[in-house]
Image (tube, rainbow, N blue to C red):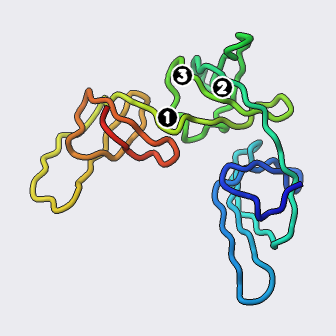
Amino acid sequence: MIDVNQLRRGVTFVHDGALLKVTEYSHTKPGRGKATIRVKVRDLRTGTNKEVTFSSGDRVEDVRLDKSLFQYLYDDGTFYVFMDQSTYEQKQVVHSVLESDAKYLRDNMELELLSYEGEIIDYELPKTMEFDVVDAENAVAGDTATGATKEVVTETGLRVKTPLFVQTGDRIRVNTDTGEYLTRV
């Protein structure tokens, strides 16, 4: 059991029988009375998002997830198929687990999958990844006063806002937490 004051982004816990992962955390202390801790969480089994409010001093059951290194193989339409690097066993992961982060998946990339009681329920992407730009609109840096941006498309279909100088064929580095452009490689 952990105190709710220890909840931070990425922490996994059990509340009312649901396995939840914190996506946002907010701590509010009014002038009098107990502080309130408001967290936005994602149910790891159903994929739904909700907001939960706790009073300071409440406790929740902390969950330890098992990490394993897997290699992404392919998408069969219903599941993403991964291979365990040590045993060569293939695991199927439901599309709802990866949701919008599926645009970061590239063939043969290594990814840490997190499991709870043998069920794969979460993942950890690398902090930054490099992608090839396959489509970039032509842009002219005319009379812009500040850094103008344009949207480019990578080989995985990921759309990223970049500076105007990025062209088709360039390789860019992207922050996977925010989806923002970092630099041209």
Q: Tag 2's secondary structure?
A: strand
Kindly give the residue lying farthest to the bottom in the view shown: 32
Q: Amino acid at mark 3?
A: Met
Which quadrant of the structure image shows residue 155? top left
Task: Give 1 or 152, whichever is nearer the viewer.
Answer: 1
The disc placed on residue 109 is 3
Q: Quadrant of the C terminus?
A: top left
Q: How far, Cα to Cα, is label 1 from label 2?
A: 14 Å
Is 146 above or below relative to 70?
Answer: below
Q: Quadrant of the N terminus?
A: bottom right
First in residue order: circle 3 vs circle 2: 2
Q: Tag 1's secondary structure?
A: helix
CB atoms of marks 1 and 3 within 8 Å: no
Is 137 above or below relative to 113?
Answer: below
Q: Which residue is mark 1?
A: 103
Q: Amino acid at mark 1?
A: Lys
Residue at 61% from the left image edge and 27% from the top image edge: 111
Q: Amino acid at mark 2?
A: Phe
Task: Give 72 or 30, whichever is nearer the viewer.
Answer: 30
Counting from the top left corner in percent of width and height, residue 118 is at: 83, 28
Disc number lying in front (3 or 2): 3
Q: Which residue is mark 2?
A: 79
Few, some or many residues within 10 Å of mark 3 (<14, 14–19, 20+): few
